Image (tube, helix red, strand yellow):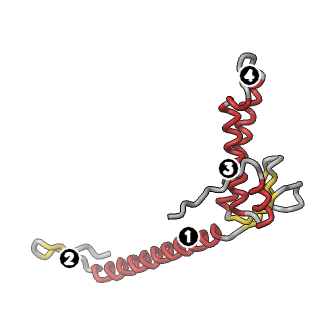
Amino acid sequence: MLAPQSVGRMTVNIFQSEMTRGAMRRRIVKKHVLLAHVFFFFAQTFIKGCVEMTLYKAYISVKSQQVYAYPDESPWEFEVTATRNEIKVFERLFYQLKFVQSRNFLRAHEPMSVKPYHVDGENDQYDRRLKKVYAWIHEFTSEDSKRFIEQLPYFQRRREVQL
């Protein structure tokens, strides 16, 4: 192995040209690896975006507060076509309904906390969430189901203002 030689104030390595070629090769390989990672990231993001925009059929049971992926899993009332994120909103709304229901159940068994239905705020929370469920179903279901939901007494379409 040859040692570096000193020439004045500068130290010169005999293998300097070899090392720079190797360093350049490593840099090129690093750039190619980086480009491959960037390409993979954008391709994965694009595919994920396409998957998120894919519409799926889901079967909604308001009675049992469930979302089903297949029509023969259990009895259901409405068929919706939506993205996965929108279907997750149904699941979250049903979770909120169950939570409010359980709170109302416990509160109903406390003496001195019984209120008339039309004055009770917790019952209003349940009603509001149920209206949201029907509004979401109305948004993503077939025309027949939309007409049925529009006939429900508590479903009101927002009126558009004509200017």
What is the CA distance from the residue labelled 1 to the residue labelled 3?
31 Å
Q: Mark 1 highlights which residue?
A: 45
Q: What residue appears at the point 60 percent right and 69 percent down from the top-left corner?
A: 48
Disc nearer the start of the sequence (4/1): 1
Amino acid type for the residue under numbered disc 4? Val
Image depth: mark 4 or mark 2 in front: 4
Q: Position of residue 108 (x, y in %)?
A: 76, 25
Query: Which of marks 2 and 1 precedes in the sequence?
Result: 2
Within 10 Å of disc 2 (Cα), the crowding (few <14, some 14-19, many 20+) is few
User: Do the residues bearing badges 1 and 2 touch, measured as CB atoms within 8 Å?
Assistant: no
Q: Which mark is residue 12?
A: 2
Q: Amino acid under label 1?
A: Thr
In 3D space, how far apart are the residues under numbered discs 1 and 2 (Cα atoms)? 49 Å
Foreground disc of the pair 3, 2: 3
Residue positioned most to the top: 112
Q: Classify residue 12 by image quadrant.
A: bottom left
Could you tell me which secondary element the residue under label 1 belongs to?
Answer: helix
Residue under the point 71% across and 63% down: 140
Earlier-in-chain disc, 4 versus 3: 4
Mark number displayed over residue 114? 4
Label 4's element? Answer: loop
Count of labels in the image: 4
Residue under label 3, please give it.
132
